[in-house]
Amino acid sequence: MNPADRDPSGAPLLTLRAAFILLLGVLSGVGAGILTFFAGNDLATCAMAGCGSAAMAVLFFHTIIN
């Protein structure tokens, strides 16, 4: 089945801007988590730092990217 058959409008699920903002947020979260791990913290702390960083990065990039 062709994917275009399921969605007759052919519109993408995300705009290019939204995908870029989410990508930057994920990259920021992964970077913060890795740096937290290398600082000697446990995995739960790394996950919390990464998720918080990703959330703040998405808000930040949503604000500055037009």
Image (cartoon, rainbow, N blue to C red):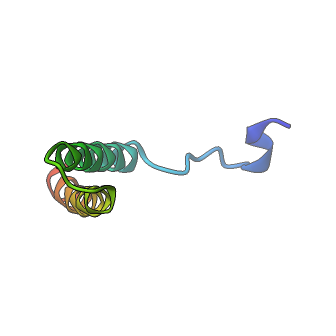
* Res 31 quadrant in image: top left
Q: In the rendering, at what x and y percent does residue 55 appear? A: 27, 62
* Residue closest to the eye, 1 or 5: 1
Q: In the rendering, at what x and y percent does residue 65 appear? A: 19, 49
Q: In the rendering, at what x and y percent does residue 12 appear? A: 55, 46
The single residue placed furthest to the top in the displayed view is 2
Residue drawn 30% across the image and 48% down it: 21
* Res 3 quadrant in image: top right
Q: In the rendering, at what x and y percent does residue 37 appear? A: 23, 47
4 relative to 36 in the view: left or right: right
Question: Where the N terminus falls, by quadrant?
Answer: top right
Residue drawn 20% across the image and 52% down it: 61
Residue drawn 39% across the image and 42% down it: 16
* Residue closest to the eye, 12 or 46: 46
The image shows a total of numbered marks equal to: 0
5 relative to 56 in the view: left or right: right
